[in-house]
Image (cartoon, rainbow, N blue to C red):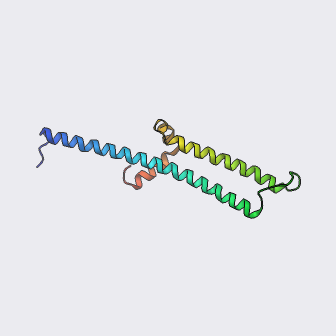
Amino acid sequence: TIDFDDETTKRKLSMDLGHEIKDNNLVKAMVRHINLACIAMITSIICGIVTIFRFITGWYHAETWEDVIPSTIYLDTATILYMIDNLILMSCIMLNFKFTVKYYNKLCSKCHNLCMSVNGMA
């Protein structure tokens, strides 16, 4: 039997709980970084596929604005897509910092909780 009144047992139990708390915080930080990296990677892959599609189909350069209307529309759409991709990438980089945890929790809590429950840590 374990004597819970013994000081060394109390100290050992408190140290074990401290390690569990630190390990849980480490797992939460790792999940946060992996989630944000995956979001950034997925948006970059989508933009890369759009760029490849753009060059394969020949929608990469319009000689004049009046002659090729679909190309003009596509170039505007691609520009907006790249701007959104850059915004997502910058947001993912920013949300990796510790001082933005409350914003991460607001924006990504459902995904984070899902990943934590898969690990059995929720």
Instruction: Spot the residue most to the bottom.
Output: 56
State left or right for residue 85 relative to residue 59. left
In this rendering, the answer to whether 65 lies above or below 57 is: above
The residue drawn where x is 85% and y is 56% is 68
The residue drawn where x is 81% and y is 56% is 70
Where residue 28 appears, x then y in whole percent?
41, 46
State left or right for residue 79 relative to residue 109. right
Identify the image quadrant of residue 4. Answer: top left
In this rendering, the answer to whether 41 lies above or below 97 is: below
Where residue 90 appears, x then y in whole percent?
58, 43
Where residue 122 appears, x then y in whole percent?
38, 49
Q: How many numbered discs sit on the rendered protein?
A: 0
In this rendering, the answer to whether 74 lies above or below 4 is: below
Q: Nearer the viewer, residue 57 or 13?
A: 57
Where residue 105 appears, x then y in whole percent?
48, 41
The residue drawn where x is 37% and y is 50% is 121
State left or right for residue 25 relative to residue 98. left
Q: Nearer the viewer, residue 27 or 109?
A: 27
The residue drawn where x is 48% and y is 45% is 109
Instruction: Spot the residue most to the right.
Output: 66
